[in-house]
Every structure is written in C-alpha cells, then in structure tokens.
C-alpha cells in the first residue's frame, strides 16, 4: 500500500525545533514500527467509504504516532529493554530523555490529528488517550491479591488496545461525514478487532516462540499480569496454587515456569483461541453492513490475519 | 475573578473512567495550583477583546492543565520531592503511575482545548507542547562542558515558559477572531511576559528565601543549570573557576555555596533584574496597542506583579 509510505513520511517529517539525537531516536522508533495494523485500518476504511484520502494520511500518521508514544512510555514503565527484537529507547537513554521523547510524540500526534481540521476527530483522539492512560493506571494501581475476572480483563484490553483501534476505524468515517449507523459499525469493528488482537497477543506469551514474541515466554505471568489464558485456567481450576503463587510470589521467577507449563497443557489455550476468533467474527459481521468492495475485503482479510499469526 | 473558579471546576470535572487514587492525585495537583497566572491572562485577554467568555473557560482550563502535566513530568525527571511547599506526586507514587498521570493530564488538556471547537487553537496547543518538549530535550541532552550563552538561554526559556504564555495570550484572540495585527501584539505580550516571568523565577534561586522558592537556594546551580545571573556574572568574569567548578564539579554540593555567594554579591543580580524589567516593558508596550479598558489595565498590572514578587 503506497499510502502507508506517505503515512511514514508524515511521521518522519522534520521539525527544525528538535535536537539531533531526538531526530535519530524518532527515525529509529518509526522505522522499527511493526506491522502498521492501525494505520492500515484507517486507510482502508477511508477507501471503503470512497472518500478523499488526503486528510486521512495525517489521521493515520496521528494514530500510529500516538501508538508509538504509548509504547515509549510503556517500555520505560515496564523496564523493557527490547521490543520487536530491537533495543528500546530507555535501554540507552536516561529516563528523563525517554519520558520527554514520549511527551513530544504525544504532541506530534495531536498536531497530526489537528491537520485533519476536524474537531470531532480531535476530541475522539484526546479521549482515546485518556482511555488508554486510565486503563494503564487501573492496571498499575490495582490490588494484585485478587486476580481479575473476565469482565475486568475485557475492560482493560479495551482500554489498552480496543480504544485505539476504534479511533483508527471510526475517525476516517467521521472525516467522510458518515452517518451514525455507519459510524456505529466502524466502532464495533474497531473495538472487536482490537480486543481480538490483544487476546491473540496475550496468548503468544504462552504459546509463541521467544523470537516471535521478542521477549521471554511467561513475561506477563512474571509481572503478575493476569491475561485470558490465566482466567480460563482459573475458571476450570479455581484457586490453583501454582498460578496464584506465580502471580503473587515474592520469588516469582522460580514459580513462573511451573505455572506456564500448567496453562500450556490445559484447555485454557483452546478456549482463549476460541474467544479471540469470536471477536474476529463480531468484527467481520460489523463490516458486512458496509459497502461491498475490494477495500472491505482487504479489511476482512486484515481481521483474519491479525490474529492468525498468533493462533 | 469568578471565572477562575469555573476554570478550576472544569479542571476538576469528574471522569468516570478514572480510578479513585488518580481522582485524588488530580484534585491535589489542581488545588495546590499556585497563582494561575496563565489562565488569568487567557481570561483577561478574552474580556479585553470583549468577546463571549464561554469557550474561553475551557481554553483557560486547557492551558493550566497542560502546565500542570508538564510540572508532573518535570518533577519526576528532576527527582523533586516538593513543589510550592507541598509533596510532589512522585514523592509518594511509583515512577510508572506518575508518568501515566502526567500523560492523562496531557490528554485531558487536549480534550479541553478541543472543546473550544477551534482547529487553529488546537494546532497551536499541540505545537506549544512540541516546543516545550523540544526545549527540555535540548537542555537535557546538551553538552554541559560549555556554559550556554545569552541567546541560547533566551531560546530555552522561550520554550520552557514563553511558548505557553503565548498560547495563553494568543489563543483567546484566535477564539475572538481577532485580526493578524492584534494576534501579533498578543503573541508579543505573551512571549515577553513569559520570558520576564522565567528570568524573575531564575533570579529567585539566587536572591529568594527558601520558603519563597520552596526548595534550597542554588538548586539550579547544583543541577548544572545555567541561568541569566550566571551568564551575566560570566560575562563580567569570563572563565571564573568558582562558577565553572560549581556547574561541572563531580562533588558539586561543596562548590555551590561559594559560587552562589560570588554571584549574589556581584552586579549580575542587578543586571538580571534590569533584563526582566526590560521584557516586562516590551510586554506592556505590546498591550498598549490594544483597546484601552479596565481589562487591559488588569493585564498591565498582572505583568508588573508577575515579576515584582521576585524583584
């Protein structure tokens, strides 16, 4: 998709006020940018609705820059030294410079969103970032003695991933002045795709290969992070000591491999897969209400592919 | 000013997505909020131009929330435990929770700015945050072996303080659909007032009382931060070893009192005062091009007062 190159170009647009090392850091962050699922969604929705794609390039760049900014801060908060197989910014920079580069990227993302000239899009953009921060704060400040349940998990992954996919899918509809019905379908598509995407990502921490995940398996468990495979397992084996010890134990690292193995060998893996696929189905169904053209087909394929890698 | 209460109310507006401890933190941050110089400027400019002050409440709340967000991140970067005599957020919270609360406040500020419904204001808002971050990154990543000169100092304090004062003064003019000439005067007013304000603040680190500054005198020196009193002193005493040692020495703390005393007893203090007052004069002159009414007088008084405390 040629437009994806234009999106990257806009993300890399020089800023004369920026100092050299930050230029380099941003180029590094943008170039090691992964699969670009979110801006692809934005561009395809725009095409599907048959509208002018000029402003949508800025919008897609805003969405992906916002995503990048949140990753920069996530990595410093988690102390992650590697992402997608390449060193994180905080691996070589001071915390201060890393925090400020993330802040700068939030500002850039807001500026890119403002280039759309659409006030409603800019409000949705701001509210999406509020939702993401609130979700992370809930997770960080939660009482970890009681593992979260399925509904709390869904709330968290909606905030973590679903909300930004909603922005990616709905905002181009807003630029296209689509009606409320269409916007509703785009919202459902983004929400369900984002949730499916995050469930599949969470599953990878159990069944992926380290090279694929880019970090050791069981990292979520080791951090005390309860994801859907854990919830499914605990639903079948309430109060299982191996899992609770791994999640809460002070000397977590010894207990993590035991818990990891127990979950890998259980039905929890299959149940998690099913649940991800159910959300993909809901995303697909929402799309089927929209005009039938090759861009809709591309979005249906993207929805399938986005979880396939993991499932 | 009653409208200032409305601004605070909008800053404190509940968000059902937020978790309880963050509600408390934000209430604490907003309530310990200092003199509110920036939102006062925004409200007074709006009144001066005789326009409807409905949207300007959101704008003033956006400006002050943006200011608050930058302080939250500044304090964690500097490791500051006290601001305005009260404990900072990072004094009691983890770095992760502090970073995310700052991010949330950036998002809130963007949402408040979006409530103005004015795309140009929202772009200026985003670009102001870019300028602030760029300025801080320049300062953080600079080579400290060579003290900065006067022009670099002015560039930095423009980014640190001037840019946000420009937003505070110019954006209400944009909401009022003022012409380019008026916007130019508002921009000059904001810029010069912000610079005067920051010079006066930097001077306090040398001549204030600890209770007034809320931190030990000489803190900037101890951090290797070169401000105008240092620059004026070095212009008179090039290469003075006491100053250079305090700024660069590994065992800074012993050398700071010596350097502090040398600068306090020099003409650098008077020269810095003069320079702050020159910028106040430029700010006043810009205002004198605008309609003569009691709100203009209030802004002239505010400009005088904003540096008086320190001078």
Image (cartoon, coloured by chain):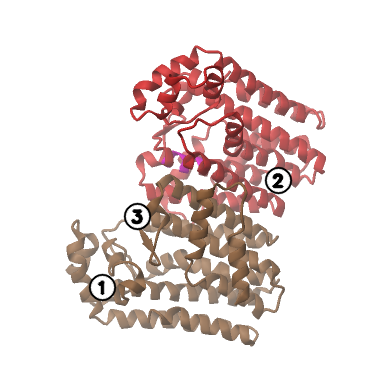
Chain colours: A brown, B red
Tell me where residue B80 sits by quadrant.
top left
- Magenta span: B70-76
Q: Chain of mark 3?
A: A
Give the number of the disc on residue B54.
2
The vertical placement of A211 against B305, above or below, is: below
Going from N to C along the chain, the mark reached first, 3 or 1, is 3
Bin the neighbour count of mark 3 within 10 Å (Cα to Cα): few under 14, some 14-19, many 20 and up: few
Q: Which residue is mark 1?
A: A234
Quadrant of the image containing the C terminus of chain A: bottom left
Q: Which residue is mark 3?
A: A79
Tell me where residue B216 sits by quadrant.
top left
Q: Would residue A134 be seen by someone viewing this image from the given angle?
A: no
Pick whichever, B155 or B290, lies toward us.
B155
Q: Position of residue A70 (x, y in %)?
A: 47, 58
Marks 3 and 2 in Cβ contact (< 8 Å): no
Quadrant of the image containing the N terminus of chain A: bottom right
Q: Chain of mark 2?
A: B
Tell me the distance, in whole angstroms, between the alpha carbons under discs 3 and 2: 44 Å
């Amino acid at each position: 998709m040629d437009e994806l190159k234009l999106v990257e170009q806009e993300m890399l647009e020089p800023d004369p006020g920026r100092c050299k090392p930050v230029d380099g850091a941003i180029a590094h962050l943008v170039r090691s940018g992964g699969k670009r699922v979110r801006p692809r969604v934005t561009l395809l929705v725009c095409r599907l609705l048959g509208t002018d794609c000029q402003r949508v390039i800025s919008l897609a760049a805003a969405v992906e820059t916002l995503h990048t900014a949140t990753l920069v801060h996530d990595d410093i908060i988690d102390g992650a030294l590697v992402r997608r197989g390449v060193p994180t910014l905080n691996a070589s920079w001071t915390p201060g410079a890393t925090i400020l580069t993330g802040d700068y990227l939030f500002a850039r993302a807001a500026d890119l969103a403002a280039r759309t000239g659409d006030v409603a899009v800019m409000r949705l953009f701001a509210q999406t970032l509020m939702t993401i921060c609130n979700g992370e704060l809930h997770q960080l400040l939660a009482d970890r003695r009681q593992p979260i349940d399925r509904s709390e998990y869904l709330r968290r992954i909606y905030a973590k991933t679903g909300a930004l996919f909603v922005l990616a899918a709905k905002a181009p509809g807003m630029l296209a002045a689509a009606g409320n019905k269409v916007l509703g379908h785009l919202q459902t598509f983004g929400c369900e795709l984002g949730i499916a995407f995050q469930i599949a990502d969470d599953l990878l921490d159990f069944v992926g290969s380290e090279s694929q995940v880019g970090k050791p398996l069981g990292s979520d468990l080791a951090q005390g992070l309860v994801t859907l495979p854990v919830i499914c397992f605990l639903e079948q084996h309430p109060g299982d000591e191996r899992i609770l010890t791994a999640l809460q134990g002070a000397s977590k690292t010894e207990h993590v491999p035991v818990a990891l193995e127990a979950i890998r060998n259980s039905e929890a893996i299959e149940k998690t897969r099913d649940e991800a696929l159910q959300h993909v189905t809901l995303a697909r169904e929402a799309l089927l209400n929209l005009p039938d053209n090759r861009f809709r087909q591309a979005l249906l394929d993207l929805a399938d592919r986005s979880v396939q890698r993991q499932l």
